[in-house]
Image (cartoon, rainbow, N blue to C red):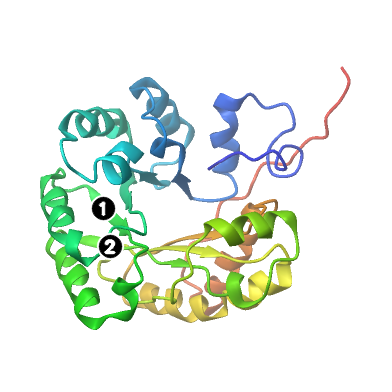
Amino acid sequence: MWTHKAWPGRFLPPSLPAKERLRAYAGWCNAVEGNTTFYATPARDTVETWARQTDPAFRFVVKLPKVVTHERRFAGVETEMRAFLNAMEPLGDRAVLWTQLPGSFGPADVDALTRFLRRLPAGRRRAVEVRHPDFFTDERSTSLLEGALAAADAEWVPFDTTVFFRSPPTSEGEQEAWAKKPRLPRRTKALTGHPVVRYLGRDAEAETVEGWQPWLTTVAGWLREGRTPTVFVHTPDNHDAPALARRFHDEVRALVPELEALPEPEPIEPATLF
């Protein structure tokens, strides 16, 4: 996601065409979640524009199509995956293939995931997000999944909602997220050199910042080990997400001063009538 109705005039120029917004977003952050790819595979020339608008170090974590992960659960998806991989080719190794699985995908389905991961192109980063509770609470299920992911050099993507569910919702956005987001334990173990973390805070900035404190130590530790983590900071309304992401980066950089600074965003000019 590199655009939001609340961002023009704050994080993006107010009248910037949609096809140019990624370039402006990349002035704030050096990675993005590709959620739209879950619903439809974009045309290859569209992805080529993504590559042109961003620095070679910019990371895309692109979600696999819904038909692959949720509807067919990896069965008979060769045509859809060929189309998806071809479309993502312009991003090269900047793209992480993100397999987000439904809560119904449990330990009994790990063999299907294993076979699917083995068929992905060599050299492409892959990451898997699971939501079935057994993977987090049952040691055998945890070990089973970790073994499958390790064999494919795939990362386990934690979606940390622990702070969000710590107290009842206080806004319309929080109420909507309360009904949709998974309630799972926090997981901080990395399996590869490229961990990916998704963190959901609250609409209140102070609660969001307080809730990510454990991640500062974890991410700093990964960096000292030579890993290259990618962290996404969300709130239910996402109104301030780019600024919050930069604040998180700054707080990690205070612990690991050698971490490269984020780019300086272009000044946002106010909208005019002429």
Of all residues shown, which one is farthest toward the top?
274
Which residue is depicted at the point 56% across and 41% down? 2
**Residue 43 horizontal side relative to residue 144, left or right:** right
Q: Report helix, strand or loop for mark 2.
A: strand
| Mark 1 crowdedness (10 Å alpha carbons): few <14, some 14-19, many ≥20 | many
* Three-letter amino acid code at the position of disc 1: Arg
Look at mark 1 in the image and give the residue it sits on. Answer: 126
Q: Nearer the viewer, residue 129 or 89?
A: 129
Q: Are marks 1 and 2 in contact (CB under 8 Å)?
A: yes
Look at mark 2 in the image and give the residue it sits on. Answer: 155
Q: CA distance from mark 1 to mark 2?
A: 6 Å
Q: Earlier in the sequence, mark 1 or mark 2?
A: 1
**Residue 212 horizontal side relative to residue 182, left or right:** right
| Mark 2 crowdedness (10 Å alpha carbons): few <14, some 14-19, many ≥20 | many
Q: Is residue 4 visible?
A: yes
Q: Is residue 92 visible?
A: no
* Three-letter amino acid code at the position of disc 2: Glu
**Residue 82 horizontal side relative to residue 58, left or right:** left
> In the drawing, what numbered circle is on residue 73?
none
Does residue 35 lie above or below 146 as drawn? above
Kindly indicate the quadrant of the structure image that contains residue 240. Answer: bottom right
Which residue is depicted at the point 60% across and 62% down? 178
Does residue 251 lie above or below 98 as drawn? below
In percent of width and height, residue 205 lies at 72, 67
Assign the C terminus to one quadrant of the image. top right
In percent of width and height, residue 154 lies at 23, 59
Which residue is depicted at the point 26% across and 53% down? 126
Which residue is depicted at the point 18% across and 63% down? 108
Q: Report helix, strand or loop for mark 1.
A: strand
Total marks drawn? 2
Q: Nearer the viewer, residue 97 or 172?
A: 172
